[in-house]
Amino acid sequence: MSTKAEIHDQIETNLKPKKKKLEQEHTELLPKFQQAAFALPGAISKYNEPMVTLYRDTLQKGTEHFAVMLSKTDVLLDQLKELAKDEGVLDDFKEVEALTAELSELRRKFNKDYGIGKTLLDQANDALEKHKQDASDTTEEWAVMEAWLRTKLDRAKKQLTQMLAARDAAKKAVAARNQKALDDAAKLSSQVVDLSPTLDEIKKQFEGFCDKCEAKGLSKEQQEQLARDRKTFEGIVAEYSEIAAKLVSTDVEIEGLEIPGVDVKKAAALLKVPSSQEAKLKKALEAGSGILKALDALGKELTPNTTGKAMIAALKKAKLL
């Protein structure tokens, strides 16, 4: 049975920080989402297709983000529900009750914004469909589809390049024991892991296009052209699928990276740091990118004096760092 202190610790160190992060994300996202939501009806009434597309894309990103935040909130509520099953919750019921209410309200907000986004997206897509000019030439339609697919593929490749750069930065951060750099790399990874449009959306668009073309009663020459173009399109979609998988697997890899702790007692024994100075040694070893400077300062207090560079070399040689 969890004690009141254990339940309190779980709430304070795990659930509340995650709730706060969700609230911050919502605060940052909402102004742009609201701006697009308020401006969309005017763009639709003026038949301004470029602006409708802009607002539609902004709302799409926002709605997808609200869906993710809804999912994360549900996870927190499930974790809190598990805590509530413990008999120890009776000792800390008010805290669990308060956090449950706060998360429920947060979920209500996310669900409301998600619903608004889906409604507006339907309006935007209906307007774009209504105002869309059908290409008079089938060959031109195929060229437009290929250009669209290649544009999305190029964007996906750029995201993969960013993701791989984030992975390299994360590995370097671990090697340098730089927690801030590792956090920055993880943040970048989370920003580029999701493709827009999704793989399913790409496939749906592509398959719908092919069905539309085949339903037109194409001439023999057009059928042959479509068959050739379809192979090209399928190759693009397959590459898009590979990139989507690499983005996810690399994001998981980055999330799993962490800076290993240093055994301060062993380090102190190796460097001949007296027990009275162990606290300073511990602080220096946790200084991240400032470790060299911190060890330099400590080295001046030791007898005999030494340098941060020499201390780091000794620790690495002993495989403690």
Image (cartoon, rainbow, N blue to C red):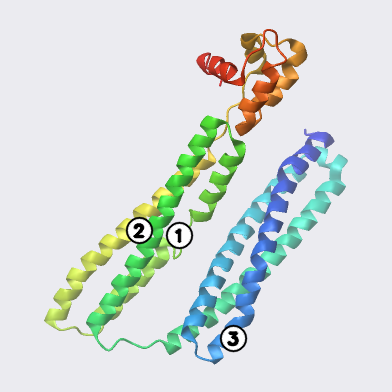
Quarter of the image for residue 178 reads top right
Q: Secondary structure at mark 2?
A: helix
The residue nearer to you, when weighing 202 against 189, is 189
Query: Amino acid under label 2?
Result: Tyr
Q: Which residue is situated farthest in the bottom direction here? A: 46
Three-letter residue code for mark 3: Pro
Whether residue 166 is situated above or below residue 260 in the rendered picture = below
Mark 1 and mark 2 in contact? Answer it, CB < 8 Å. Answer: yes
Residue at the image position 54 percent from the left and 87 percent from the top: 44
- For the C terminus, the image quarter is top right
The residue depicted at 60 percent of the width and 33 percent of the height is 289
Residue with the mark numbered 2: 240
Residue denoted by label 3: 41
**Mark 1 vs mark 3: which is more N-terminal?**
3
Nearest the viewer among 36 and 19 is 36
- Residue tagged 1: 195
The residue most toward the left is 220
Q: Earlier in the sequence, mark 1 or mark 2?
A: 1
Percent coordinates x, y for residue 184 in the rendering: 57, 45
